[in-house]
Amino acid sequence: MSLYLKNATWIDWESLEFTKTHLRVDEGDAGLAFVDTVPASLETKGSGEQVIDCTGRYVTKSFACGHHHIYSALARGMPAPAAAPKNFHEILKYVWWVLDRSLTGNMIRASALVTALYCLKNGVTFVIDHHSSPLAAAGSLGIIAEALEEAGLSHLLCLELSDRDGTEAAEAGLEETEVFLEKHQGLVGLHASFTVGDALLNRAVSLAQKFGTGIHVHAAEDGVDEEHCLRDYGVRVMERYRDRGLLDLEKSIFAHCIHLSEEERNLVTASPAWVVQTPESNLNNAVGILNGRGLKRLMFGTDGMHSDMLRTAKTAFFLASQSGGGLSPPDAYLRFRNVHRYLAESGFSGDGDNNLVILKYDSPTPFCRDNFAGHFVYGLEARHVESVISGGRLVMDRGRVLTVNEEEVLAEAGEQAAALWKRMSGGRKSH
């Protein structure tokens, strides 16, 4: 069945050309086509086709998130940790490592569904996720994939491998990664250099090579990562990753990269790997602001803070002057869209031309190709996302998600959050 978008103003996401047209959207490879007319017969009830009147609306490619943490979705409003963290390492130790150890399969599913709900509300149809549930690794990636697909999202998943929870947890993570990659596209996930020993690092690279994929890893998010690497390995983080072959993997993603030295930045720039920036999470953790200067393969993610990529782009734009990197509105938009280039160049599926947002943008000023970047930074917001099409299928219509029951998803998330917080309370007493 085709979906027709009548009287739309199409914004080409790459050229930013504005075109008044009718669009036909199909599922599968057929994707998107411009049509001269929408036959009147298609607008009659029972025709089997669907027509949406987009008069006064803008249609463009939907959005994608370059680095999410779906596993953190049930953290909002949770009780404070037993001890107040004094630094980034303690934030991990007292908050996130307690949470990820407490997750169950039901909690992971609830986290994925509620994240999918918020992604669609924000116009996001593709998620690159970095999951962590070290004591519930088996089947976890499959649970997330099934939930996202049920809601209508495409994905690129990985499970965070680490030595911090012992050999058994690391082995379970490796096994889950291999089982998942045998049937799905994905990446091999690692936490960060300071929790990953050489043996696990080598096995992760071998696994990525086996499946022709990349490593998705936190890199130099905080100074502790560099300090630990220098102390234990005699090199800086990116030098260690270079020596172990991570920089040779074309599909690798390095998250954060705030504390890289100039030499490390040069290593990343010379490699085929990508960097993902998560400005709000970095602010929340007080770890610094990424200077994106010279990093050509740089995209945006949310790090689990939320699912609003427009918000992330604005934050990065306003922060850029504080980091010494500078960021013009056109460059902010380019970085916002780079995730699509990463996916296309890496050969991953699910981010085709038939992934669209319909925007009801109530601008008080002229809006056109020449001033699009200014509107992108200062005007466009998630509230302007009226409808969403994913893989040629209408998944959100005028603010209402069609694929899952919003009330049921939120109710289940609330129940699972309460159970998670209770488990975390017990976990804090034992750590």
Image (cartoon, helix red, strand yellow):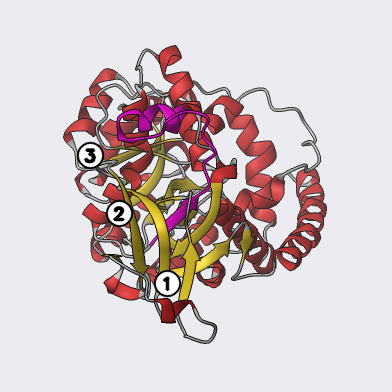
Q: Nearer the viewer, mark 3 or mark 2?
A: 2
Task: Name the residue: 81% across, 44% down.
Answer: 429
Q: Quadrant of the N terminus?
A: bottom left
Q: Estimate how packed mark 2 is, as few (under 14), some (14 to 19) or many (20 or more) residues with alpha carbons within 10 Å.
A: many
Q: Number of callouts in the render?
A: 3
Q: Which residue is mark 1?
A: 3
Work out which residue is located at the far left of the displayed protein and give it: 270
- Would residue 283 appear left or right of 336 to someone viewing this image? right
Which tag, 1 or 2, sits closer to the chain's start?
1
Out of 128 and 123, give the one closest to the viewer: 123
Task: Name the residue: 70% across, 51% down.
Answer: 74
Q: Nearer the viewer, mark 1 or mark 3?
A: 1
Determine the secondary structure under disc 3.
helix
Q: Quadrant of residue 325?
A: top left
Task: Name the residue: 75% across, 27% down.
Answer: 84
Whether label 1 touches label 3, CB < 8 Å = no
Residue 185 visible: no
Q: Nearer the viewer, mark 1 or mark 2?
A: 1
Name the amino acid, label 1.
Leu
Q: Quadrant of the C terminus?
A: top right
Name the amino acid, label 2.
Leu
Q: Estimate how packed mark 1 is, as few (under 14), some (14 to 19) or many (20 or more) residues with alpha carbons within 10 Å.
A: many
Q: Which residue is mark 2?
A: 343
Tell me residue 171's x, y (percent): 47, 63
Tell me residue 359's x, y (percent): 49, 48
Task: Name the residue: 22% across, 39% down.
Answer: 243
Residue 73 visible: yes
Q: Which residue is mark 3?
A: 243
Q: Which residues are magenta?
A: 355-377
Determine the secondary structure under disc 1.
strand
Q: Residue 364: within the magenta?
A: yes
Determine the secondary structure under disc 2.
helix
